[in-house]
Amino acid sequence: MSRRRKPQADSRGFTLIELMVVVALIAIASTIAVLALRDPAAARLDREASRLAALLESARAESRALGVPVHWVPMVDAGSGAALGFRFVGLPDPEKRPAGWLEAEPLAVQAYADTPAGYASTRALVLGPEPVIGAQRIVLRLGDRQLVLSTDGLGPFSISADAAGSP
């Protein structure tokens, strides 16, 4: 007599291959999530640079419209060299203008103006009233990151990550 085998009951659980595929998908998703996260210092530096470029351009336009000389002056702490804030000298209603950074932690700031011998450190940037103001740049530093705001004197202030050409 031949014995008939009973069909095996459906297997329960997951196979090793299925588990490995799930683990691989989780690893890929977590890697993408980690790479998408941005360094908070770099994000802050970008925000501050964009805001400062907009403020410089608005002060420059207002200087030309009013016909008054305007200077951007960073308020630097003598001990640390960090800029606690800044001010626009020459514009009316200085108390209504932004005079500080978005966050309390100060940024290291160095301003440069173009001279016949190259860029030289300066305490203030000239923003007008002349339409051509001369090449100028500001180097913003936060931790080990830095950004440069620069103008050729005719165009607007633009942001770059490269500080090439600054002393």
Image (cartoon, rainbow, N blue to C red):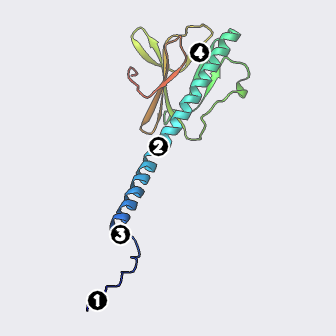
Tag on residue 127? 4
Point out the frontmost of discs 4 and 3: 3
Q: Mark 1 — residue? A: 3
Q: Report the residue at 67% width, 17% height from top.
A: 90
Q: Is residue 97 above or below residue 133?
A: below
Q: Which residue is situated farthest in the bottom direction here? A: 1
Tag on residue 20? none
Numbered disc 4: secondary structure: strand
Q: Which quadrant would residue 119 be assigned to in this image? A: top left
Q: Amino acid at mark 1?
A: Arg
The C terminus: image quadrant: top left
Taking 37 as reference, is 7 left or right? left
In terms of depth relative to the viewer, which is nearer, 7 or 159?
7
What is the distance, in whole Å, between disc 4 and disc 2 at their CAs?
A: 32 Å
Q: Mark 3 — residue? A: 15
In terms of depth relative to the viewer, which is nearer, 40 or 139?
40
Residue 82 visible in the snapshot: no
What is the distance, in whole Å, between disc 4 and disc 3 at their CAs?
A: 70 Å
Q: Sort mark 2 into few (<14), some (14-19) or many (20+) by Cα contacts within 10 Å.
A: few
Q: Report the residue at 68% width, 8% height from top.
A: 67
Q: Amino acid at mark 4?
A: Leu
Q: Sort mark 4 into few (<14), some (14-19) or many (20+) by Cα contacts within 10 Å.
A: many
The N terminus: image quadrant: bottom left
Pinpoint residue 163: horizontal percent, then vertical percent. 41, 25
Pinpoint residue 20: horizontal percent, then vertical percent. 35, 62
Numbered disc 3: secondary structure: loop
Which of pointers 4 and 3 lies earlier in the amino acid sequence? 3
